[in-house]
């Protein structure tokens, strides 16, 4: 059975920012660096967080996080961390600010050098110690689940998008207020929501044995499948926003069981110069990967079908996912994201080196991945 390590505290519901002072004290954070992105600032979501901090707390704000954090952006935030003499990080935003917060917590406390040495595929798990600075996470999207996970996706200097991960990087506490997602545009609601659904679906398809993860992913998929089209159609639907926040958290709690080819391929494409959105990549790839994996899905197939209220066959499930993506305004093919056909062979090679490649239910090689990418490109 895969290890089960659900370690952080989760505050879920409207108004949970009131718990921020207590969690800062528990984490021993007195001089936080708050990392976020320009979109969060423009949406007015920074002010309520600053207002929730203890009176007089010295906080520095780094608001330049890009949509796909790279080593240069980690160094820029690290400079602000050191200048402020910070002792912890608050991540505010979607997966990018939350991942960058973890990377800064690592870089500030570990030997200097390329971040790739801390990547999972480079044996970095054993190099990350309890010295990592404490992190608190405040998500403003419902998709990545980075607020409850141990990993952070960073584009390395060599162009690879790799995951650095360790239990020492799990945020000490997460503040999941669905109200913070109400103003998210429909396109981002759709893309981040499909990321959450992909986490739940790939977890259920993973060949590893973890019934606890399966139960969490099953409920997350059921909630997300029903709520996502409602949240896209009406951003003010509080019940849909709450269920999407739950689906996001549940997907990330469960995916330590292992994901699969969808994420192996999306990670390989994530370092592309066009900076494709991770959730959109997952949405485009998911139907193709499900059809490829169909012969190996076994007991996962009826679980997926039941959670999604669909017929018990992979074709119906993959077709329903493709139809949902079109219904909520997501592109059907990779070309729409600025990816060229000439980029596909390198992505296929890269996917075979991603750690999620190892837990795809059906063994796949470079040729299989290239065929999947060509299908997704032409869709």
Image: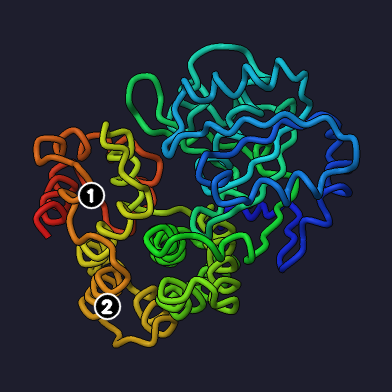
Q: Are marks 2 and 1 in contact (CB under 8 Å)?
A: no
In the picture, measured across the screen, residue 289 lies left or right of residue 310, that is left
Viewer-nearest residue: 13 or 53: 53
Question: Residue 352 lies in what quarter of the image?
Answer: top left
Numbered marks: total: 2
In the picture, measured across the screen, residue 39 lies left or right of residue 150, that is left
Q: Spatial distance from mark 2 to mark 1, Cα to Cα?
A: 24 Å
Write the residue at 67% across / 52% down.
Answer: 5
Q: Earlier in the sequence, mark 2 or mark 1?
A: 2
Residue at which label 1 appears: 364
Q: Secondary structure at mark 2?
A: helix
Q: Residues within 10 Å of mark 2 (few under 14, many from 20)?
A: some
Quarter of the picture holding the C terminus: bottom left
| In the depicted structure, whether residue 151 falls above or below residue 333 | above
Residue 236 location (% of width, % of height): 54, 74
Residue 10 location (% of width, % of height): 73, 58
In the picture, measured across the screen, residue 275 lies left or right of residue 217, that is left
Residue at which label 2 appears: 320
Q: Secondary structure at mark 1?
A: loop
Q: Mark 2, mark 1: which one is toward the viewer?
A: 2
């Amino acid at each position: 059975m895969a290890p089960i390590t659900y370690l952080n505290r989760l505050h879920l519901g409207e108004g949970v920012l009131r718990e921020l002072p207590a969690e800062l004290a528990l984490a021993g954070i007195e001089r936080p660096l708050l990392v976020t992105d320009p979109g969060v600032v423009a949406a007015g979501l920074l002010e309520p967080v600053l207002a929730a901090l203890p009176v007089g707390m010295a906080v520095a704000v780094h608001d330049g996080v890009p949509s796909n954090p790279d080593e240069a952006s980690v160094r820029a935030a690290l400079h602000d961390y050191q200048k402020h003499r910070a002792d912890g990080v608050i991540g505010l935003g979607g997966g990018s600010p939350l991942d960058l917060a973890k990377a800064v917590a690592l870089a500030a406390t570990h030997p200097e050098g390329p971040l790739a040495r801390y990547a999972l595929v480079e044996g970095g798990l054993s190099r990350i110690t309890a010295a990592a600075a404490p992190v608190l996470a405040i998500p403003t999207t419902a998709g990545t689940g980075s607020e409850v996970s141990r990993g952070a996706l960073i584009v390395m200097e060599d162009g690879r998008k790799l995951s650095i991960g360790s239990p020492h990087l799990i945020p000490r506490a997460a503040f999941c207020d669905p109200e913070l997602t109400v103003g998210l545009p429909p396109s981002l609601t759709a893309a981040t929501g499909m990321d959450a659904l992909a986490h739940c679906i790939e977890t259920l398809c993973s060949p590893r044995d973890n019934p606890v993860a399966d139960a969490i992913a099953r409920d997350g998929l059921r909630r997300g499948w029903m709520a996502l089209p409602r949240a896209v159609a009406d951003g003010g639907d509080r019940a849909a926003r709450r269920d999407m926040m739950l689906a996001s958290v549940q997907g990330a709690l469960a995916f330590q069981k292992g994901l699969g080819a969808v994420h192996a391929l999306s990670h390989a494409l994530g370092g592309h110069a066009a900076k494709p959105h991770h959730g959109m990549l997952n949405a485009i790839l998911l139907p193709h990967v499900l059809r490829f994996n169909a012969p190996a899905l076994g007991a996962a197939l009826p679980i997926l079908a039941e959670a999604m209220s669909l017929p018990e066959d992979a074709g119906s499930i993959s077709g329903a996912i493709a139809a949902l993506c079109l219904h909520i305004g997501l592109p059907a093919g990779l070309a729409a994201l600025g990816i060229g056909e000439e980029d596909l062979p390198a992505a296929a090679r890269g996917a075979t080196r991603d750690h999620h490649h190892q837990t795809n239910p059906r063994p796949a090689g470079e040729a299989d991945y290239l065929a999947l990418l060509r299908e997704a490109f032409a869709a």
